[in-house]
Amino acid sequence: MAAPDLPVISASALDLTFQTGDGPVHALKDVALDIHKGDFVSFIGPSGCGKTTFLRCIAGLEQPTGGTLSVNNMTPDEARRARAYGYVFQAAGLYPWRTIARNISLPLEIMGYAKSDQAARVERVLELVELTGFGGKYPWQLSGGMQQRASIARALAFDADILLMDEPFGALDEIVRDHLNEQLLALWARTQKTICFVTHSIPEAVYLSTKIVVMSPRPGRISDVIESTLPKERPLDIRDSPEFIEIAHRVRDGLRAGHADDA
């Protein structure tokens, strides 16, 4: 566990180049970023800018080719083995032959938790994501939004301090997405997790985050880091406030500047 004054996640001069049959692909270049305990950090940028690649580096699923990256003062691979994070993918990825409760308990089964502990944890996280009473249902019996909430519950089941979320609401309609944004903020307030969240939506990034990381086209670089001045309590109609609109304009300007640099 990182000390309170140290970053939970720290990247310095981070590079990643993939070797392909068509030659090298420079996915990340000179990425430097500190994320502290309890931060809600959104990553936004055009497709192919390295948002998900950086998230996968944090998770130890990709290996940087230059620079340094630490998670809880460990290497990403050590942090992965220590189960320092939960990961929520773009698709819910629930097994259709397992009930919601048994989908959520799957990582606990793999980790060797006792059945009584599994049941207690599943019940707790179902309540956290407002799915109490749905543990006995199968994925096909739930809406897309409810499936994503079950996926979040699975990532929370073993109580990791860090939650990595790769555009989890991107495929959902706007009404459902708004509702899940509200629920995610409430969940973050209750659990005090450190959240890294990939999105293509400027309003979503501004609404959710304490810090917004704007990335430029490939090779992925950080073109701006915006500290939010919005209060922690954020009703949806805060999106109509001058403060919200000002932050959204800065994000949009950062995205434009990244494209201009690439021209």
Image (tube, rainbow, N blue to C red):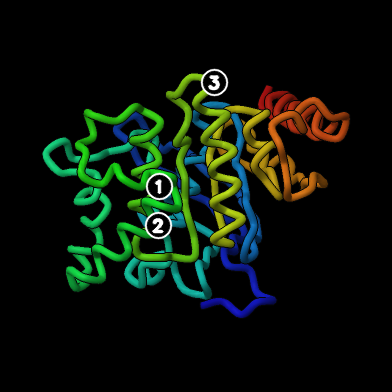
Element under disc 3:
helix
- How packed mark 2 is, by other alpha carbons closer than 10 Å (few <14, some 14-19, many 20 or more), is many
User: On the picture, is 113 further left or further right than 30?
Assistant: left
Q: Amino acid at mark 2?
A: Leu
The one nearer the camera, 130 or 32, is: 130
Extreme-front residue of the structure: 133
User: On the picture, is 131 further left or further right than 215?
Assistant: left
Q: Which mark is residue 152?
A: 1
| Vertical relation: 257 (above or below) 72 | above
Q: Quadrant of the C terminus?
A: top right
Q: Which residue is mark 3?
A: 174
The answer to whether mark 1 and mark 2 are in CB contact below 8 A is yes
Q: Amino acid at mark 3?
A: Glu
Q: Amino acid at mark 1?
A: Ile
Q: Is residue 96 visible?
A: yes
Q: Residue 222 at what x, y percent from top left?
A: 66, 43
Q: Residue 13 at what x, y percent from top left?
A: 61, 57
User: On the picture, is 147 further left or further right than 13?
Assistant: left
Q: Which residue is mark 2?
A: 156
